[in-house]
Image (tube, helix red, strand yellow):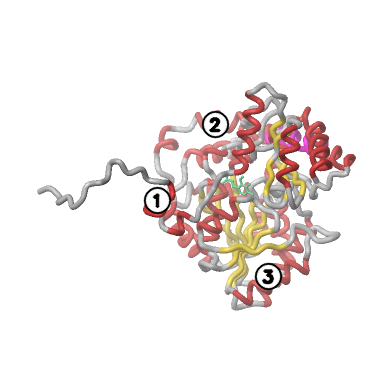
Amino acid sequence: MTAEVTSQPDENRVWTLEELEDTLLPGHASNKSGRDIIFAWLARYQEAKASGQEAINGTVGSLLEDNGELAVNPIVSSTLRQQADLEMSAYAPLPGLPHFRALVQELALGDGLAEIQSQGIHTEAIITPGGTGSLYMSARNLLEPGEALLLRDYHWGPYNTIANECGVTTATWPLTGKDSQIDEGALRSILSQLLIDQNRILSWLNDPAHNPTGMTLNAESRMQVLSIFADTAANNPNKGVTLFLDGAYAAYSREHHGWGDTIRDFTRECIWPGNLLVCYGFSASKSHTLYGQRCGALVMLHPNRSFIDRLVEVMLHTGRGTWSGAARLPQATLHSIHSDVDKFVDWLHERDRLQQMLDKRRELFNSRCAKEGVPLLPSHDGYFAFLPHTNPEPIAQAAAARGLYVVPLRGGIRIGLCSIPTADADKAAGILAEAWRISG
Ligand SMILES: Cc1ncc(COP(=O)(O)O)c(C=O)c1O
């Protein structure tokens, strides 16, 4: 039996994009837009380079060698290639390979982990597709739709996209205080304000080596932040408070496990309120130069074992309903590297070399900016530096006209030190200074 055809499509009709959108996309989807500004400025750099101009690439968020090639930690790629067929083909258990789940907690929190656990804090980790997956899981489950996620004033742009996909709004607290790393008054006040309007707090804090500034909190500031969140929880026993530490760039900061140390010190000295949850988003994208393998983890810390188990169940439900499982191959690779002394030492040496390369670029860039009076935000570690400005586009245009390609974001210019060759770091700062003077 054939279906009855009631009308024929008009073969001459030319659909406009607007008509197609109106017809095929529901409102919540057609509100989405996403021309990625970073890729647009990278394309401009590539065009300039292809047309034979001298051009410096400060656009991308991947670490490039001084010759412009992607930095790849060789022991990681060779170990990946040596994995058994099973590791390449089989599904991983949904929470991740058990040995990876144990390892990733150490990678995230370092030597502090054992003492944190011995102080009665239970920890668990589940594999996620990149650090992004862990952020998504938290936004999906630790807030009610429509509630506000707390961010710092300057943050990685996709934070807004993830919040949007999870149906939550955003609120912000200042990046720094006037003369201190933390504006304690502003943070306490936004936390109190949020708890008048909603039943839970979820705050994402990208530290150390913050994207887009390169700022890193020192030990005192870390403890100050954790104590403020713990106080907020203690003073609001009917509300839930989650501090999510996004450690995407921790491998390239001076204190790789600073947060592990701070949490350990906190558990030694302070009482952990039951309504306080701490999460850590691990990413192997930068630390193991495995950007495309999509390997990350959500690490959760709480004094109640049963609650941690329940959280695992809840988060895995989100994973199952969104991306199903995460890739097995990078989990097996990381475990092979970190359970073999020779491989581990190779990984560490290369990681340190890459970190030193970044440090050198930053030193050259920061000191020239200081000499030229360019008011960069505090910048200590990692991939980026940031020049705040209310109208960044003309500065980026003027820099591009002089051969430096950087990214104008809301609130300023992001400079990817990770992609600027060391030999060009001083020159790049000189160009930025000139562009800032004439357009600022
Ligand atoms: C601040 C920040 N958090 C998290 C991530 C997550 O990266 P991935 O999902 O590749 O692990 C990135 C990547 O650029 C980032 O910049």
Tell me, yes or no, whether the two marked residues, 3 and 2, touch with CB atoms within 8 Å. no
Task: Identify the residue at horizontal 70%, vertical 41% (top origin).
Answer: 383
Is 314 located above or below residue 255 in the figure? below
Earlier sequence position, callout 2 versus callout 1: 1
* Residue span colored magenta: 351-364
Whole-Å distance between the Cαs marked 3 and 2? 45 Å
Q: Secondary structure at mark 3?
A: helix
Identify residue for label 1: 19
Q: Which mark is residue 79?
A: 2
Is 418 located above or below residue 148 in the figure? above
Instruction: Give the residue type that dot 3 points to.
Output: Leu
Residue lying farthest to the left in this orientation: 1
Residue 327 percent coordinates (x, y): 47, 42
Asked if residue 277 can be seen in this view, the reply is: no
Q: Is residue 359 magenta?
A: yes
Q: Which mark is residue 248?
A: none
Would residue 389 appear left or right of 13 to someone viewing this image? right
